[in-house]
Image (cartoon, grey):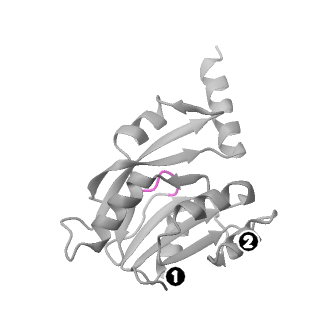
Amino acid sequence: MRENKLTAVVLSKNEAKNLAGCLKSIDFCGEVIVVDDFSEDNTVEVAKKHNATVVQRRLAADFAAQRNYGMAKASGDWLLFIDADERVSPDLKKEILRVTAAPSSPANGYFLRRRDYWLGRELKYGETGSARSLGFTRLIKKGKGKWAGRVHEKHGEAGFIYAFLMSFHSFLVRAKLFQHYREASSP
């Protein structure tokens, strides 16, 4: 592990196309663990090329269990949870490093706000609107709680970081969004 005690945990499934950008954005982390759901593309090779530790585990439609598994494998004092289609912005990197380097922190975890993009345009409404304004708990102290909830999982009380995590949705997410909007607009 590099000098800092920050581990990034990346969840992936057939994300070879997105993973390199994600891993480049978290190169400041002392350890990177990719929890892969037995990808059928070259996601694992991309992860290894970027010196990430790869562990494979079936998702079984339970994101909280996948994050808890990654948390158990991590050696850092602080854990950054990120999806393969997300990127840490330069401003967010600065805030994460400031928070994790402090000798003491008022919070055991932090909400990270996320800006979502689809087809090159920022999404601002629905779930993406709350992700932008409220954020998700994604930065936590190791050993301070567990993830709960199979989808849209929660970690617990947390502080707030103001810089943005960027999400460039993969094809599967785009397909789900299209299906949701089509069903919502059907009579």
x, y (%) of residue 149?
A: 46, 57
- Residue for badge 1: 73
Look at the picture and state if 178 lies above or below 10: above
Q: In the image shown, does 165 or 94 lie closer to the viewer?
A: 94
Is residue 62 visible to the viewer in this orientation of the structure?
no
Where disc 1 sits, the SS reads: helix
Look at the picture and state if 47 lies above or below 179: below
Front disc: 2 or 1: 2
- Residue at figure coordinates x 61%, y 52% from the top left: 85
* Kind of residue at badge 2: Val
Confirm whether the magenta stretch covers residue 30: no
- Residue at figure coordinates x 35%, y 38% from the top left: 133
Q: In the image shown, does 165 or 91 lie closer to the viewer?
A: 91
x, y (%) of residue 63?
A: 54, 61
x, y (%) of residue 17?
A: 73, 55
Is residue 83 visible to the viewer in this orientation of the structure?
yes
Q: Quadrant of residue 15?
A: bottom right
Say whether marks 2 and 1 touch (CB < 8 Å): no
Look at the picture and state if 55 lies above or below 36: below
Where disc 2 sits, the SS reads: helix
Q: Main secondary structure of the magenta part?
A: loop
Q: Earlier in the sequence, mark 2 or mark 1?
A: 2
Q: Is residue 151 left or right of residue 48?
A: left
x, y (%) of residue 168?
A: 60, 44
- Residue for badge 2: 44
Bounds of the magenta segment: 150-154
Decide: few, some or many residues near mark 1? Use Cα within 10 Å; few <14, some 14-19, many ≥20. Answer: some
* Kind of residue at badge 1: Lys
Q: Is residue 184 left or right of residue 110?
A: right
Q: Is residue 52 left or right of residue 143?
A: right
Q: In the image shown, does 55 or 149 lie closer to the viewer?
A: 55
* Alpha carbon distance from label 2 to label 1: 17 Å
